[in-house]
Amino acid sequence: MENDTSRRQDINLAVITVCLGLIVGCSSMLLGVLLDTVEHLFLGFVENNQMPVAVNALPSRRLVSLIIGGIISAVVWYFLQRNWEPVGINASIKGKRMPVLRTAIHVMTQIFYVSTGGSIGRELAPRQAGAMIADNLSRSFDRHGWSIDPEDRRLLIAAAAGAGFAGVYISPITGTMFCLELLYKKINSRSVAVSVTMSSIATMVGSITKGFVPYYLTGNRHYGLVVIPLAILLGIVNGFLGTIFKKFIKLASQYRVKGKAILWQLSLVGLLTGLVAMFFPAVCGNGRGLAQLAMNTNSSTGLSGALLWLVFGFFAKAIVTLLTIKGGGYGGTLTPSIAIGACIGVLLGVVYMAVVPGVTLAQCAVLGAVSLLAASQQAPLMALFMIFEVCHMQYSALLPLGLAVAVSIWVSKQMQK
């Protein structure tokens, strides 16, 4: 009898895993369509890896877009939170229900704000959407006689959150690592099978509109052993900076305004971001533009001017992202971390390249991005595979990327003792 019950639970889990992969993949795909639609409406461009931000839009249009986006998002979040607190993914895993309508509005508002140019990551929205779908679908199946073990339900929610990420960034391994390393935090054959299957299905569905193209263009040159000392150096520096950035993110989240204060504070942040975006478009959005700017930096032409812009971008992106969170906005911090880390990678890489030839600034940017991401998220495997997947890296990159991540997370752990 016990074997029959266990077999039935396994079958139920397998069926629900496939169903969630398809549904969450569709959810991520639709959020991507929403992003493209709002960007085209407000900024008049379609985002891609060659044009990650609206550089061709008039400065006044970027300003107006961010002002309107900040005001509308502030109003929506104000009314949404008058008698409801957004339920996070970890709270859902612990058993708190994620209501469908309010969570959906919360998720779409995140996408709307970043689409108008708001400085925050977009990856939290598909993760929350995935968790909400898994939470409610598993409860529905349970009510209709499908036996779902409470532990399996927690796994399904964590895996669906990772699958939501995978469906947007077309990165199944990253989605799997996000589930196992940051959310479920248990690695066994059952959790690996569920998370890999769900993220892979969501990736295939999401690729219908996104295609299988790199999110960042890095040149994909061979990574030789000459980059190893730079990987160690960036691991040390960005392990420190990433930990500091994480602490500031935590503080901004703890003191995030609510109530009527969000109406003026988030609107003011939108205005401030818009003023910066008038002359520095790369500050807009989730950080893709700034990271690509760092990766595109050329050592042969206009280097000094480019470095000054990267210094400015480093501080501007960090400040407006933290102000967005403090001002009442919601969103991810993965891609802003990548952008900030890429800037540091280029700035230190210029000095390194003066001594050690055979390294490109794009490689420096990538190493900086992965090392700061690992420390700021406290997720070395997720950081490693995210950069590897979204940049479509060669296998020669695994050694320096892994080394940069290992050093970074070690430095971060030492700082937190």
Image: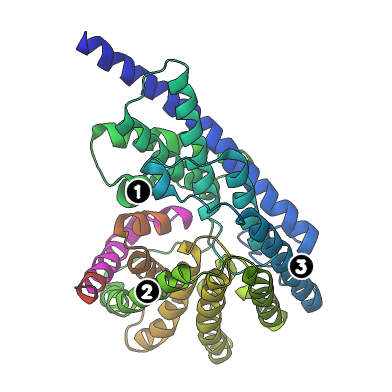
**Picture coordinates of residue 10 (x, y %)?**
32, 20
Describe the element under mark 2 as helix, strand or loop: helix
Q: Nearer the viewer, residue 309 or 22?
A: 22
Q: Nearer the viewer, residue 86 or 6?
A: 86
Q: Real-space Cα distance between discs 2 and 1? A: 19 Å
Q: Residue furthest front?
A: 83
Instruction: Report which quarter residue 266 is drawn in.
Output: bottom right
User: Magenta residues, as a range?
Assistant: 388-411
Name the disc covering residue 183, or none: 1
Residue depicted at x 54% and y 44%: 129
Q: Real-space Cα distance between discs 1 and 3? A: 35 Å
Give the labeled residue for mark 2.
247
Label 1 crowding class (10 Å Cα cut-off): few <14, some 14-19, many 20+?
some
The reply to whether residue 190 is visible in this rendering is: yes
**Picture coordinates of residue 249 (x, y %)?**
44, 71
Instruction: Report which quarter residue 43 is drawn in.
Output: bottom right
Q: In the picture, which quadrant includes the N terminus? A: top left
Q: Earlier in the sequence, mark 2 or mark 3?
A: 3
Mark 2 is on which residue type?
A: Lys
Mark 3 is on which residue type?
A: Ile
Q: Is residue 333 left or right of residue 35?
A: left
**Picture coordinates of residue 229 (x, y %)?**
26, 77
Q: Nearer the viewer, residue 116 or 150?
A: 150
**Picture coordinates of residue 275 (x, y %)?**
70, 82
The reply to whether residue 44 is visible in this rendering is: no
Q: For residue 402: magenta?
A: yes
* Circles 2, 3 touching at the beta carbon (< 8 Å): no
Q: Earlier in the sequence, mark 2 or mark 1?
A: 1
Q: Is residue 159 left or right of residue 304?
A: left
Mark 1 is on which residue type?
A: Leu
Residue depicted at x 47% and y 64%: 333
Give the labeled residue for mark 3.
68
